[in-house]
Amino acid sequence: MSFAPKKARREKQKAVIGFIGASGSGKTVSALLTAYGMMREAYPDASEEEVWEKIGVADTEHGRSLLYANEQFGEVKVGEFLHIDFDPPYSTERYNDAVQALKNAGCEVVIIDSLSHNWQGEGGIIETHAGMSGNSFQNWGKLSTETTSLIKTLTRNNVHILCTLRTKTEYVVEPNEQGKSAPRKIGTKPVQKDEMEYEFMINFVINAEHLAETTKDNTRLFEGNLVRLNEDVGSKLYKWLELGVDIKAEEAAEKAKEDEERAELAKEIRKLEQISEAHKAKVTEFEYKTKAKVEDFNLLLLERAKSLLETIEAPATEEQTN
């Protein structure tokens, strides 16, 4: 198969974002508010109900996301998003099924809360590996297709994917505001395969104060800053995603332009059917212009107009009357 190089152009993107943090850091709420900001930006004239219907949650956390329905966060009241109670087993196939179900229900943003269960949960990859017989190292190789399939689920479903990931919790002892030593909970590595972080467009790492910094940010919108993840972040993100070239929209616009030109030509041809003998010469001029632009039904209409002109009796012109 030969390759066909072409000039690089940035196209519209679908978000694949990780919300990484320890328990209680606010991953789920951050994802909900970000999703809301994206869809509110996408549908500025839609009702609140319509906007929330564009957001779906695949919930592996025993329905925890439902705790936030109808709760107020700043200026946003969480509405009735679509929800899947995602019970075990947490296999890669079932993650894909959950995303597909929400997509088919009309969701344009899918929140996976959480992706960590696919790695370290009932029926997840670690448990599956533990139950396999034979060489442990070779068994990991056999399971590599699970990660490949999961990456396809995140990147090839043509919906925005926001994933929460748990981190292993550790404590550090440091001076508090009173200058006394006190333990502070921190999150370390996310609970997922190490390479999975590279698949995300943005990785938001959220601390105990519910502020996030990025360890990866392809958008370069948030790098180097601590941000509170809310609807404004979602709005800003959606605008960035929409800055790319939409190839399908370009093709549709080009076709619409051609159709409009053809319609205008057809309209002029129909007018020719009514012209007088004194304007016959214009048919020849118009024929030349038409042939230079189109090759289809407009030429048939032109032939029809010419045929009519040859058979009808032209009315006298104003000049002849005078």
Image (cartoon, helix red, strand yellow):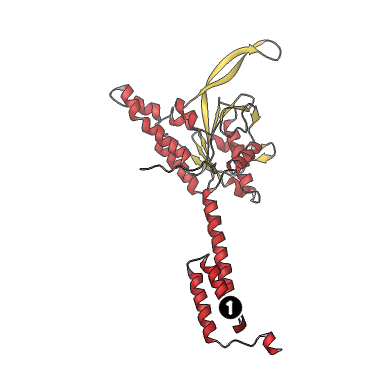
Q: Quadrant of residue 64?
A: top right
Q: Quadrant of the N terminus?
A: top left
Tell me if residue 71 can be seen.
no
Q: Position of residue 113 (x, y in %)?
A: 52, 34
Q: Position of residue 272 (x, y in %)?
A: 58, 77
Q: Which amino acid type corresponds to the residue marked 1 in the rendered image?
A: Ala
Secondary structure category for the residue under label 1 = helix
Query: Is 266 drawn above or below residue 20 in the view shown?
Result: below
Q: Position of residue 196 (x, y in %)?
A: 46, 29
Q: Residue at x 53, y 58 (%)?
A: 255
Q: Quadrant of the C terminus?
A: bottom right
Q: Residue at x 70, y 39 (%)?
A: 75
Q: Quadrant of residue 141?
A: top left
Badge 1: few (under 14), some or many (20 or more) residues near its Cα, within 10 Å?
A: few
Q: Is residue 192 left or right of residue 55?
A: left
Q: Residue at x 57, y 72 (%)?
A: 286
Query: Is 102 drawn above or below residue 172 in the view shown?
Result: below
Query: Is 239 drawn above or below residue 116 in the view shown?
Result: below
Residue located beneath label 1 in the image: 281
